[in-house]
Image (cartoon, rainbow, N blue to C red):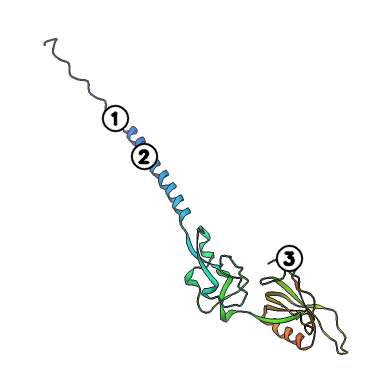
């Protein structure tokens, strides 16, 4: 055999299977990381159209389109707690005070047939604080006349009224009293009307811890 014959080129060693698997796992981890970041960013950018109150809405009031406006907000997992466009009908009423600029919660609206409150106007014989306005929680106190025409000690007549509006009467006949439109439970209407008819002295005072 000729010594000068060129030697056969060395054979390449086959690539280990574990090296290919490690590369594949690494690539999958990178892809999963990118997908996770994309999903987080997409979720943060996703908004929902819900209603916000355009004005302060009193309990028992019918809620119409003019009382609401649509806003786009990112609510995430609490999206179902707020009212969207399809949830307001002609028979929708407020079940509690909804303040101007507040997102409208689902539990703040109800069907008109189920409304349990109404409005009455009372004349407060005492000054109404300047902090009392639409949406304020107040108590109505009454000092009735007894059988001899003597004024009895005041007592709470309505403990959970909401102010719908206040109008001062500065005329001589009004004596500087304030007429206060109140939202009260229907169950209290008879007592309030009886107190007015019986010439009880009514006073409207802020409820304990009440805020506008």
Quarter of the rendering occupied by the N terminus: top left
Q: Position of residue 177 (x, y in %)?
A: 77, 79
Name of the residue lying farthest toward the left: 1
Disc 2 crowd rating (10 Å Cα; few below 14, some 14-19, many 20+) is few
- The answer to whether 135 appears left or right of 200 in the picture is left
Distance, label 1 to label 3, CA atoms, is 77 Å
* Residue where numbered disc 1 is placed: 15
* Residue where numbered disc 2 is placed: 27
Residue at 53% from the left image edge and 79% from the top image edge? 91
Q: Position of residue 128 (x, y in %)?
A: 76, 73
In which quadrant of the rendered view does residue 162 lie? bottom right
Q: Earlier in the sequence, mark 2 or mark 3?
A: 2
Q: Position of residue 123 (x, y in %)?
A: 75, 81
Residue at 26% from the left image edge and 25% from the top image edge? 13
From this view, report whether residue 32 is shown above or below residue 174: above
* Residue where numbered disc 3 is placed: 209
Tag in front: 1 or 3: 3
Q: Earlier in the sequence, mark 1 or mark 3?
A: 1
Disc 1 crowd rating (10 Å Cα; few below 14, some 14-19, many 20+) is few
Distance, label 2 to label 1, CA atoms, is 18 Å
- The answer to whether 92 appears left or right of 117 in the picture is left
Quarter of the rendering occupied by the C terminus: bottom right
Numbered disc 2: secondary structure: helix
Name of the residue lying farthest toward the front: 171
Q: Earlier in the sequence, mark 2 or mark 1?
A: 1
- The answer to whether 34 appears left or right of 73 in the picture is left
């Amino acid at each position: 055999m000729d010594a000068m014959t060129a030697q056969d080129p060395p054979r390449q060693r086959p690539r280990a299977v574990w090296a290919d698997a490690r590369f594949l796992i690494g690539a999958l981890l990178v892809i999963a990381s990118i997908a996770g970041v994309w999903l987080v960013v997409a979720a943060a950018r996703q908004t929902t159209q819900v209603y916000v109150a355009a004005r302060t809405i009193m309990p028992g009031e019918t809620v119409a389109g003019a009382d609401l406006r649509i806003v786009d907000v990112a609510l995430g997992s609490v999206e179902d707690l707020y009212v969207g466009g399809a949830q307001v009908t002609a028979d929708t009423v407020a079940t509690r005070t909804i303040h101007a600029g507040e997102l409208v919660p689902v539990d703040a609206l109800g069907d008109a047939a189920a409304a349990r409150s109404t409005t009455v106007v009372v004349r407060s014989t005492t000054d109404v604080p300047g902090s009392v306005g639409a949406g304020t929680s107040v108590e109505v106190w009454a000092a009735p006349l007894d059988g001899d025409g003597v004024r009895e000690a005041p007592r709470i007549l309505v403990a959970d009224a909401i102010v719908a509006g206040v109008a001062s009467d500065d005329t001589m006949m009004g004596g500087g009293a304030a007429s206060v439109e109140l939202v009260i439970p229907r169950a209290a209407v008879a007592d309030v009307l009886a107190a007015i008819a019986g010439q009880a002295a009514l006073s409207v005072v802020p409820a304990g811890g009440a805020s506008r």
